[in-house]
Amino acid sequence: MKVPAVLKNLTLLDWVLVVVFVALVAYLVQSFFPPYGWAMGAVAALGMLFIAKRRRDRLDQEQKQ
């Protein structure tokens, strides 16, 4: 089974930060856009995390070269 590139090179601390960040953003968006703000917040947080992970991987690759 092939693991997506987004899920590679994640430590336990990375996973904890992902869960905390998604929960925090979902809670904050929920407070402004009830009743489905939590879903919008979760999608937005996952999108931001995807962009950040992609940038981190690119910087790691450039640093190795």
Image (cartoon, helix red, strand yellow):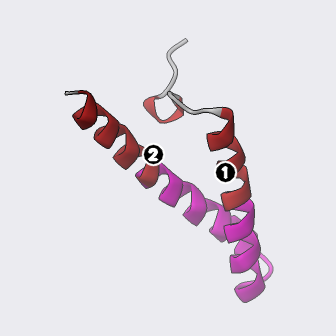
Q: Earlier in the sequence, mark 1 or mark 2?
A: 1
The residue to which callout 2 is attached is: 53
Q: CA distance from mark 1 to mark 2?
A: 12 Å
The residue to which callout 1 is attached is: 17
- Determine contact: label 1, label 2, CB under 8 Å: no
Residue at 35 percent across and 48 percent down: it is 55
Rendered view: 46 above or below 25: above
Asked if the stretch drawn in magenta spans residue 62, the answer is: no
Under mark 2, the amino acid is Lys
Q: Main SS of the magenta segment?
A: helix
Q: Quadrant of the C terminus?
A: top left
Task: Determine crowd level at label 2: few under 14, some 14-19, many 20+ residues with C-alpha closer than 10 A.
Answer: some
* Whole-percent x, y for residue 12 in the image: 68, 34
> In the orientation shown, which residue stands out farthest toward the top?
1
Residue at 50 percent across and 16 percent down: it is 2
> In the orientation shown, which residue stands out farthest toward the right?
35
Residue at 72 percent across and 45 percent down: it is 16
* Whole-percent x, y for residue 58 in the image: 30, 40
* Image side of residue 21 versus residue 9, left or right: right
Q: Which contiguous range is marked in magenta?
A: 22-51
Q: Quadrant of the N terminus?
A: top right
Rendered view: 17 above or below 23: above
Rendered view: 29 above or below 11: below
* Image side of residue 58 versus residue 14, left or right: left
Closer to the camera in the image, 24 or 31: 24
> In the orientation shown, which residue stands out farthest toward the bottom?
32
Could you say whether the residue bearing mark 1 is in a helix, strand or loop? helix
* Whole-percent x, y for residue 49 in the image: 52, 53
Under mark 1, the amino acid is Leu
Rendered view: 36 above or below 16: below
